[in-house]
Amino acid sequence: MNPPEAAPDFLAQLGWEDAEILPLAGDASFRRYFRAVGHDRTAILMDAPPPHEDPRPFIAIAEWLHTRGFGAPAILGSDLGAGLVLLEDFGDARMRETVDAAPESELRLYEAAVDILIRLRDHPAADVPAYDAGVLHREAALLTEWYCPAIGADVDASGYRAAWDAVFDRVVAATPVTVLRDYHAENIMLVEGGLGLLDFQDALAGHPAYDLVSLLQDARRDVHPDLEAALLDRYLRTTGVGEEFVTAYHILGAQRNAKIVGIFTRLWQRDGKPRYPGLCPRVWGYLNRDLEHPALAPVKSWFDANLPVERRGDPMALAGA
């Protein structure tokens, strides 16, 4: 993975002219990451190439979080035209690998991650678009747009929208918070003094349950139902919210997991990334549990009629069945 041509000049302008540029793992987008290594310091170079990516939302939310005491990386410099941003380096200690290597740390680190979301409730939402019913519908539709055709399922798309329409009112009326939208163990770093946050450029103003379900129904690692229940209870006890929040948690869990199944299918079919379909069975497991909540009865009825349990799984495997 070669750095962008403009990177050396960009780094030189910021006083990093002698830095070595080393590749880091990318993500599911067009963004790429590199580590700039100087004699006694390091930083992260984000390559967010226009027109595919726009680094301005990331910079804005990073600064919003940073000024409120949350662990977002400091912005060391940017060239918006080239799509380059130099960030504080949080190191390599991700929550995911730390917990997997030391299971005894799991509860402590997940509690710390939940506590960040509790603190976010204390701040009015950032100046970002609303996570409204239109966005929720558009995301949920990714399942019928990508997953269903991939497995050859002819489904009732209008009935799907109507089913979601019957439940979304329960989640759009709450006082909004800043929703980071991809808050899970692979986007949380262990840094001095706490946890560092990454991948929040798509933040919206929405229901506080969304990021909690993103953390506790993690598409990329198993979160045991007992741990999920304990951490949800911690959130409820600390904030004083009640059953309506639990209802929203499961509605947004079902919506998010349906969206992820669609996105992972799209990453395989459109973007040529075949590792993502294999993550779908875990996501379906979460979705099936969420659908058991009574508030989701209309949505569950649609799934039972259109995608019975045997058609919920790895789309690549089902497509070849």
Image (cartoon, rainbow, N blue to C red):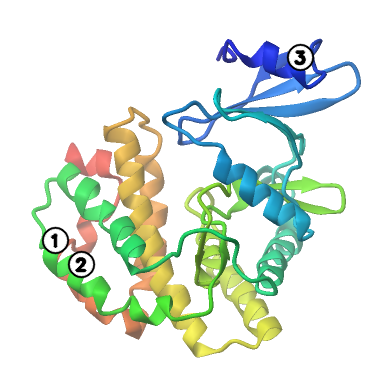
Tell me the amino acid under the disc marked 2: Arg
Question: Could you tell me if the residues under marks 1 and 2 are in contact, i.e. CB atoms within 8 Å?
Answer: yes
Eyeballing the image, is 47 above or below 143?
above
User: How many angstroms separate mark 3 from mark 2 (CA)?
Assistant: 52 Å
User: How many angstroms separate mark 1 from mark 2 (CA)?
Assistant: 6 Å
User: How many angstroms separate mark 3 from mark 1 (CA)?
Assistant: 53 Å
Eyeballing the image, is 313 above or below 14?
below
Number of numbered discs overlaid on the protein picture: 3
Q: Most extreme residue toward the right, as rendered?
A: 40
Q: Is 87 in front, or is 305?
A: 87
Which numbered mark, 3 or 1, is in the foreground of this view? 3
Residue 12 badge: 3
Q: Residues within 10 Å of mark 1 (few under 14, many from 20)?
A: some
Direction from residue 106 to residue 273 in the image, left or right: left
Direction from residue 262 to residue 55 in the image, left or right: right
Eyeballing the image, is 70 above or below 164?
above
Tell me the amino acid under the disc marked 1: Ala
User: From this viewpoint, is residue 259 visible?
Assistant: yes
Which numbered mark, 3 or 2, is in the foreground of this view? 3
Eyeballing the image, is 161 above or below 37?
below
| Quadrant of the image containing the N terminus | top right
Question: Could you tell me if the residues under marks 3 and 2 are in contact, i.e. CB atoms within 8 Å?
Answer: no
Q: Earlier in the sequence, mark 3 or mark 1?
A: 3
* Residue marked by disc 2: 161
Give the residue displayed 49% in from the left and 80% down from the top. 174
Tell me the amino acid under the disc marked 3: Ala
Direction from residue 172 to residue 119 in the image, left or right: right
* Residue marked by disc 1: 157
Q: Position of residue 14 (x, y in %)?
A: 78, 22
